[in-house]
């Protein structure tokens, strides 16, 4: 059988999450599943499963197969973040310099550029997908909350169960801050994408 060609796709991260990746605290992200209109997500959990076929990581339900838009294990994701490109080449990143005013430098446009407009050459982070699955948002474990970038290391704590609750509370607040008030309570189906950081190569 012919081997599958690795694909590369962009993915947006907030400055806070970029910092978590750079610090080695984040190795997982959750994104809301957006199925075709014909797909009814009000199915019982045991009616839905996630598997991997030869053509990628997919979600099987009563209506067929839904491909993960972020890719499959082995695929690459290049991170888009808020940045300011220099007119002479290169860029600066808001996640590194939250109080930096790019107006004082020779940057294109004289201000920060939203992450959605970052070109491939300006991306400094490349991630390799290691696992993809589907689950309900509120099914997240405390360990996965930490893999999502929790800022505190409680590995030596004598009361880990207390910190498990704190980790979930942190992630609930993070999710609502990104997706809007009440987004956690909606408990949507989400893609769970695990990744590892890989060496960054120059792009022209």
Image (tube, rainbow, N blue to C red):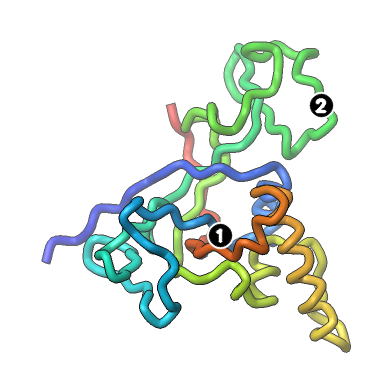
How far from the left and from the top, in percent, is residue 90? Answer: 60, 24
How far from the left and from the top, in percent, is residue 64? Answer: 25, 65
Q: On the image, which quarter does residue 67 sit in? A: bottom left
Give the Cα distance between marks 2 and 1. 29 Å
- Secondary element under disc 2, as helix, strand or loop, is loop
Task: Looking at the image, tell me whether mark 2 or mark 1 is earlier in sequence order.
Answer: 1
Q: Which residue is mark 2?
A: 100
Per the rendering, the mark at residue 63 is: none
Contact between marks 2 and 1 (CB within 8 A): the answer is no
Q: Nearer the viewer, residue 165 or 5?
A: 165
Q: On the image, which quarter does residue 57 sit in? A: bottom left
- Secondary element under disc 1, as helix, strand or loop, is strand
Q: Which residue is mark 1?
A: 30
How far from the left and from the top, in percent, is residue 113? Answer: 63, 24
User: Which residue ends up furthest to the bottom in the rendered image?
Assistant: 158
Image quadrant for the N terminus? Answer: bottom left
Looking at the image, can residue 193 be seen? Answer: no
* Residue at horizontal 64 percent and vertical 11 percent from the top: 109
Residue 147 vertical placement versus 16 (above, below): below
Q: Is residue 12 left or right of residue 17?
A: left
Q: Nearer the viewer, residue 200 or 126?
A: 126
């Amino acid at each position: 059988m012919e081997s599958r060609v690795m694909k590369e796709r962009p993915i947006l991260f907030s400055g806070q999450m970029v910092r978590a990746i750079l610090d080695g605290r984040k190795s997982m992200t959750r994104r809301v599943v957006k199925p075709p209109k014909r797909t009814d997500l009000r199915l019982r959990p045991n009616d839905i499963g996630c598997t991997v076929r030869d053509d990628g990581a997919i979600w099987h339900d009563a209506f067929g197969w839904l491909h993960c838009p972020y890719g499959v294990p082995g695929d690459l994701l290049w991170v888009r973040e808020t940045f300011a490109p220099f007119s002479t080449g290169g860029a600066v990143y808001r996640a590194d310099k939250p109080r930096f005013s790019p107006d004082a430098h020779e940057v294109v446009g004289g201000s920060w550029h939203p992450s959605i407009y970052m070109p491939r050459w300006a991306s400094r982070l490349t991630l390799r997908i290691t696992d993809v699955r589907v689950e309900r948002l509120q099914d997240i474990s405390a360990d996965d909350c930490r893999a999502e970038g929790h800022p505190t290391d409680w590995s030596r704590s004598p009361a880990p169960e207390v910190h498990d609750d704190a980790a979930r509370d942190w992630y609930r607040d993070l999710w609502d801050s990104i997706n809007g008030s009440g987004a956690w309570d909606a408990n949507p189906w989400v893609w769970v994408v695990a990744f590892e950081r890989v060496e960054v190569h120059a792009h022209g």
